[in-house]
Every structure is written in C-alpha cells, then in structure tokens.
Image: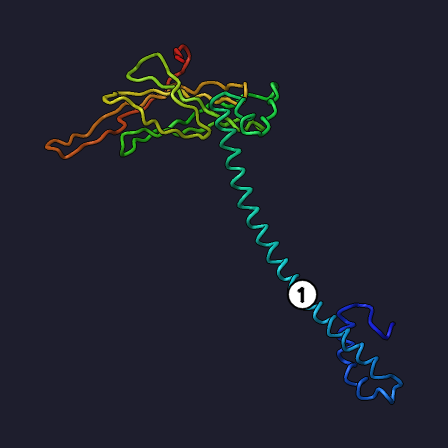
Amino acid sequence: MATVPTDDRQLITFCTAHQATWVTNQAAIGIVASQNTAMATALTNAQKALDAANTARVASKGATTTFNTTSTILRGAAADIVRSVQTFAKNSDNPGVYGLADIPAPQPRSQTAPPPGQPGSITASVNSDGSLTLGWKSNNPAGVSNVIYKIQRAVNGDMNYTLIDTVGERAFTDQTIPAGTQSVSYIITGKRGNQTGPMSENFTARFGSVGGGGGGGGGLFIASTSTTPSTGMKMAA
C-alpha cells in the first residue's frame, strides 16, 4: 500500500494530518523548510479546489433537480397541445391539421381490427339549466381504443335523426334541446378510424314539468325513458 494516498481526498487528509509534524521535526527527519513551504502551498490550493468542486456538485444536483421538474411540466404542456391538435384533426376530419401543427399524423389503423362495441345501458339526467346529460357503456373488443362516439338526435318522435356532436368520452351533455320539447331520442354509435360499430338502441326520454304558479318557478324532469331497436331509423347529415 502506498504511503502517500493515491485518492485525492485521502491525500488532502494525509497532508493536513502530517503538516505540523513535518514542520516541527524537519531537521530531525531530513527535510528542509522549502519542502514544507511547497507542500503547504499545494495543500491550500488543493483544499480550495476541493471546496469549489463540492460547491459545484451541490449546485449541479440542485440544477439537475430543477431541470427535471421543469422538463416534466414542459412535457405535460406539449402533450396537452398535441392531444388537442389530434382531437381537433379527428373531429374535423381534416388531416391537414397535422401538417399545420408540424406533428406526424397517426399511423392508419389496421383494417382488420374489430369495430367498436355497441353502446348500451344509456342513462339520462336533467340538469338545473334544462340541459340533458347522457351516459352509456360500451364493451369494446380487446385492443380497440381511442373510440369516438357520434351522437344523433330526434325530437318529439321524429324518425329523422340528426348528428349533433361527436365526443371522446362515454358521456354527453345536450344543451340545445328546443324549448317545449316533449320527448327527445338519441342513437349513439362508436367509431374508430374507418371502423364504425353497431348503433345503440334508440333511447328516448319523455319530459314532465312541475308547476310553479305565481312566479314560484318550476322545472323539467324525466317522466319516463325507453329503448327500442334502431333498425329503420333515418339518419340526416
């Protein structure tokens, strides 16, 4: 084992521990003052450099932590924009949006992939502002994701259904029900790429109202709901 440590930090400890002894006993141990002076200068410089390195190391760790944190925030912001661009391009059926945003368009989905499942178990509730919120379930096949749902509506028993919105969730709030509507019917269809799943059954909600004579208000409520097969329904653009 070497007498003088090869590790730089151990070397500083070694020289610090021996400095006073070598100065005191220099004549008795065969060294001269100039040697002790040279070592003292080198020891001071090495200690200053070590202190600077330790300070820089701590600062580097802090800077790295800050960088990682800010990068996480930046990644989330960028991902949010990309998701919005993708949703807008999908809902507007305009692939040119990807070029304008300078991001790659999603790869075409395999045409052999199964279509989305049939939406079912449709529920509805009336909100305080008179809008109607729908919810449904859809058992999509394994591997089928990123499904969007077309919402088609008819009012007051009309057999002509009109597309009113497309959503990426299994819920939709209809805020455009005409005033005085007695019943409203919906058909929901899942779509993934070029694959369209089977239509849901026709879901109908019939409205009732509670009186509020004398200016006391009143409100709308769902008096009854029903589902019937959608075969033969007419779909308007």
Left or right side of 231 for 65: right
Left or right side of 117 for 59: right
Of 80 and 158, the residue lying toward us: 80
Left or right side of 191 for 45: right
Of 77 and 150, the residue lying toward us: 77
Q: Position of residue 222 (x, y in %)?
A: 28, 27
Of 222 and 174, the residue lying toward us: 174
Give the class, few, some or many, for how many residues have Cα within 10 Å of label 1's Cα (few <14, many ≥20). Answer: few
Q: Position of residue 186 (x, y in %)?
A: 37, 21
Q: Residue placed at 54% from the left, 22% from the top?
A: 96
Q: Residue placed at 86% from the left, 88% from the top?
A: 27
Q: Position of residue 137 (x, y in %)?
A: 45, 29
Quadrant showing the N terminus: bottom right
Quadrant showing the C terminus: top left
Q: Is residue 203 above or below residue 215?
A: above
> SS of the residue at dot 1?
helix
Residue at the left extreme of this rendering: 214
Q: How many marks?
A: 1
Instruction: Give the residue type that dot 1 points to.
Output: Asn
Q: Residue placed at 48% from the left, 25% from the top?
A: 148
The answer to which quarter of the image holds residue 180 is: top left
Q: Is residue 2 above or below residue 170?
A: below
Q: Position of residue 17 (x, y in %)?
A: 76, 80
Left or right side of 151 for 217: left
- The figure's colour scheme reads rainbow
Residue of label 1:
54
Residue at the front extreme of this rendering: 34
Q: Is residue 199 above or below residue 40?
A: above
